[in-house]
């Protein structure tokens, strides 16, 4: 491996194994003015001024979280949804989050920006002004270009892996379209002495604690020879939108599409979805006990709905306790719980 340090000194490094943990960087679209006029979530917290009226482009958890706290400090906020909210998360929960955010006067627009134009430059104590253009479609089939001015435009449409220019193609390391390394667990599927941990690994949750734990487990496996593995599909995750959302396991859509192979006696798979904000709770559980290979499929699951009052609401009086909601998902052939 040929490396160059900050002093432009070139050095060659040899090793039996290489671990890549370069993380991700914010993605900018190939749209006029995007890089010149927009900031990322990396930039947002280092601003010396209040961002003012803000457009959050994208409906990722980063975009929705930022929209929530910007509204919370009194700013006017618009979220521009290019496709769906919270891709990869349960869409029933995502729509509940959207509805709740709309009650807080956060505006949602379904469109894709076509141009960004800088009208005023920001200073140390105040934001600038950016004109954003997009195309809006109407029920009669007509389209027209819409423009609106914002003080700050936050680009949150995803992140790309920092793997270009590393020479990975020289050793045939297979990568995804976003540059992430495709691995069997942490090991590259095409180059057995290259490993990846953290966000740069395809299919890995983009969470710092997960990367830290995966790194520790990988080291124990490589150095001691044990068989310990990181279970990436059983990682508890929280999205800090105004209606807080926690989950562990598969979303309902993923459970319907999942291909299952089980060869041991019994397997319990728990899918937990939890939202809490203004007294609203949502829970989803998926139970699995199978001995063959099949897709769950919509026809193989039952969904139950109920309302409940959580324990912490039974002591203090809460106006919103009638909104607590429970959602239970289980396989039709395994609906016995103990």
Image (cartoon, rainbow, N blue to C red):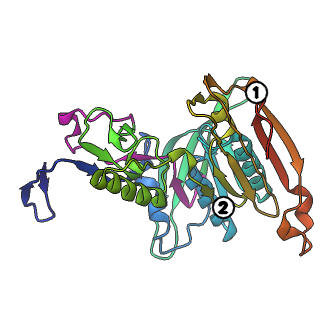
Left or right: residue 169 compared with residue 219? left
Identify the residue shown where x is 79% and y is 43%.
Answer: 337
Residue 310 location, x and y as percent? Answer: 84, 63
Residue 202 or 262: which is nearer the viewer? 262
Residue 200 or 221: which is nearer the viewer? 221
Does the rendering let one see residue 91?
yes
Q: Earlier in the sequence, mark 1 or mark 2?
A: 2
Q: Which disc is residue 68 wearing?
A: 2
**Residue span colored magenta:** 149-177
Residue 153 location, x and y as percent? Answer: 53, 55
Q: Which disc is residue 139 wearing?
A: 1
Does the rendering let one see residue 164?
no
Identify the residue shown where x is 60% and y is 55%.
Answer: 236
Please, is residue 239 above or below residue 179 in the view? Answer: below
Quadrant of residue 259 within the rendered picture: top right
Please, is residue 197 above or below residue 251 in the view? Answer: below
């Amino acid at each position: 491996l040929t490396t160059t340090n900050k002093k432009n000194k070139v050095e060659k490094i040899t090793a039996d194994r290489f671990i890549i943990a370069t993380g991700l960087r914010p993605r900018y679209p190939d749209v006029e003015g995007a890089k010149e006029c927009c900031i990322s979530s990396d930039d947002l917290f280092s601003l010396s001024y209040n961002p003012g009226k803000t457009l959050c482009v994208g409906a990722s958890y980063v975009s929705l979280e930022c929209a929530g706290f910007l509204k919370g400090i009194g700013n006017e906020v618009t979220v521009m949804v290019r496709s769906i909210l919270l891709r990869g998360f349960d869409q029933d929960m995502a729509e509940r989050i959207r509805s709740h955010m709309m009650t807080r006067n956060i505006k949602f627009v379904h469109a894709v920006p076509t141009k960004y134009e800088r009208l005023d430059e920001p200073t140390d104590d105040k934001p600038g002004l950016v004109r954003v253009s997009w195309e809006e479609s109407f029920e009669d089939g007509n389209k027209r270009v819409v423009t609106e001015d914002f003080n700050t435009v936050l680009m949150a449409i995803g992140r790309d892996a920092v793997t270009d220019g590393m020479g990975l193609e020289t050793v045939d390391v297979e990568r995804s379209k976003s540059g992430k390394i495709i691995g069997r667990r942490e090991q590259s599927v095409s180059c057995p002495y290259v490993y990846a941990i953290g966000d740069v690994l395809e299919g890995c949750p983009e969470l710092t604690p997960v990367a830290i734990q995966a790194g520790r487990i990988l080291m124990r496996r490589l150095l001691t020879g044990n068989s310990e593995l990181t279970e990436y599909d059983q990682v508890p995750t929280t999205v800090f939108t105004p209606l807080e959302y926690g989950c562990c396991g598969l979303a309902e859509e993923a459970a319907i599409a999942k291909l299952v192979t089980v060869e041991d006696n019994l397997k319990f798979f728990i899918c937990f979805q939890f939202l809490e904000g203004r007294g609203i709770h949502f829970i989803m559980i998926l139970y699995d006990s199978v001995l063959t290979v099949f897709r769950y499929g919509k026809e193989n699951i039952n969904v139950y709905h109920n309302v409940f009052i959580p324990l912490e609401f039974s002591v203090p009086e809460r106006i919103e306790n009638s909104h607590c909601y429970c959602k239970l998902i289980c396989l039709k052939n395994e609906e016995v719980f103990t």
